[in-house]
Amino acid sequence: MAERKIVVVGNPVLRERATEVTPAMLGTEALHALIGDMVDTMRGAPGVGLAAPQIGVSLRVIVLEDQPGSMSYLTEEERRARERVPFALTAIVNPVLRFIGEDKVTFAEGCLSVPDYAAQVARFREVEVSGLTEDGGAYSWRASGWPARILQHEIDHLDGTIYVDRMDTRTFSVLEPREG
C-alpha cells in the first residue's frame, strides 16, 4: 500500500457526489488496494478519517480510526467534553447515515483537504451508519460523540460537502502549530 496525495479544496472531486461501489467491485484486489492506500494516507497525514474523494477517487468509501496517540494533546476534561474515545480502524463502503435524536454539539473541526484551518461546526451527537465491508458483508455502527462527528464529516465528503459549508463562519481561523 502507499500514501497518496490529498486533494485540497478547489479540486472538483471534492464537490461531486461520489459514485456507489458496485457489487462487482466488492472484495476485489483493486478495492482492497484503494482502502489500504486510504489508511496509509490517513495515518501519514495524520488524520482520524478519510474519504476516497480526498485522494481523488470518486467512490463512496471512507476509513476512520482514532487511537489514544491522536488525542494525546487533549486534556482528560477536553476528551470527556468531546466524548472522544479510541476506536479501531474501520472501512465502510457505500455508507448511509441516520441521525439519532435532535441533540447537536459544536466543536472545532478541521480537514485534511482544507489544511491549516479550523472552525466550529455543529454536528448531531449520535448517528447510525450502515453500509458494507470491503468484502461485501453488511456493516452497521451506532456511534455518539467524536466518532459520530468523524462519520458525519467523512460521509459529507461523499456528498460533495466540506465542513466549511456547515461551519460558523465567524470562527474560521488558522490553526496554531501543535507541539509534539
Image (spheres, rainbow, N blue to C red):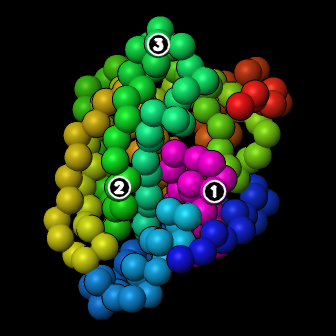
Q: Residue at x 79, y 39 (%)?
A: 116
| Residue 51, above or below 46 | below
Q: Are marks 2 and 3 in contact (CB under 8 Å)?
A: no
Quadrant in the picture for residue 43: bottom right
Residue 170 visible: yes
Q: Position of residue 69 (x, y in %)?
A: 52, 35
Q: Position of residue 42 (x, y in %)?
A: 57, 56
Residue furthest to the front in view is 180
Q: Amino acid at mark 1?
A: Gly
Q: Residue at x 55, y 26 (%)?
A: 72
Taking the image as shown, residue 98 lies to the left or right of residue 162, namely left
Residue 160 visible: no
Disc 1 on helix, strand or loop? Answer: helix
Judging by the rendered image, the residue that carries numbered circle 2 is 90
Residue furthest to the top in view is 77
The numbered mark at residue 44 is 1
State how far apart marks 2 and 3 are (Cα): 24 Å
Disc 2 on helix, strand or loop? Answer: strand
Q: Position of residue 139 (x, y in %)?
A: 20, 59
Judging by the rendered image, the residue that carries numbered circle 3 is 76
Highlighted range, magenta = 41-57
How packed is label 2: few (under 14 Cα within 10 Å), some, or many (20 or more)?
A: few
| Residue 79, above or below 17 | above
State how far apart marks 3 and 1 are (Cα): 25 Å
Q: Are marks 1 and 2 in contact (CB under 8 Å)?
A: no
How packed is label 1: few (under 14 Cα within 10 Å), some, or many (20 or more)?
A: few
